[in-house]
Amino acid sequence: MTPAIRAAEAAGVPHQVVEYAHDPRARSYGLEAAQATGQPPERVLKTLLARLDDGRLVVAVVPVAMRLDLKALASAAGAKRAVMAEPRDAERATGYVVGGISPLGQKRRLPTLIDTSAEAHDRIFVSAGRRGLEIALAPADLRALTEGRFAAIARD
């Protein structure tokens, strides 16, 4: 059991854990998860970390079919600029490895922004804390568990 699953269970949030055989040759962990779980890519979200111009790390959760808009993320986080965090910084801050970073159960709670497109679905899928493991839950529950907020931070 991962910290992400423990966080959902401890909060009593309705969820489903979905495991699939991860292919180490996969080029996109998120698209692999969508295909393996049979979910449309709009419902499977990836967890990315960015560094704001003031040095803070922020978590961005966006559909795997879309790209993170760094300008929109910076604006939503109250900063002027954002860049993608170095993988080792993301792993150190969250306690997860790249490709398996979950927005839930992170080692250090970071400000979290979830793309508004997630609200269009009754259930979304995010990493459950390791490659090949997803957790499905309501977008409002993800927001509550991360103490995050919805913002338009993704683009095609």
Image (cartoon, helix red, strand yellow):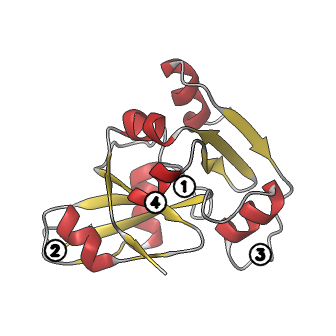
Q: Residue at label 1?
A: 101
| 87 with respect to 50 (left or right) | right
Q: Is residue 104 above or below residue 73?
A: above
Using a 10 Å C-alpha cutoff, classify the residue at mark 4 as few (fewer than 14 neighbours), some (14 to 19) or many (20 or more). Answer: some
Quadrant of residue 131 within the rendered picture? bottom right
Using a 10 Å C-alpha cutoff, classify the residue at mark 3 as few (fewer than 14 neighbours), some (14 to 19) or many (20 or more). Answer: few
Mark 4 or mark 3: name the one nearer the start of the chain: 3
Mark 1 or mark 3: name the one nearer the start of the chain: 3
Query: CA gap, disc 1 to disc 2?
Result: 22 Å
Q: Amino acid at mark 1?
A: Ile
Q: Amino acid at mark 4?
A: Ser
Using a 10 Å C-alpha cutoff, classify the residue at mark 1 as few (fewer than 14 neighbours), some (14 to 19) or many (20 or more). Answer: many
Query: CA gap, disc 3 to disc 2?
Result: 32 Å
- Look at the numbered disc 2 and give the secondary structure of its residue: loop
Q: Exactly how many numbered labels are in the figure?
A: 4
Residue 127 spot, x, y in % from top left: 61, 51
Q: Residue at label 2?
A: 53
Residue at position x 43%, y 37% from top? 140
Q: Residue at label 3?
A: 26
Mark 1 or mark 4: name the one nearer the start of the chain: 1
- Look at the numbered disc 4 and give the secondary structure of its residue: helix
Tell us which disc is closer to us: 4 or 3: 4
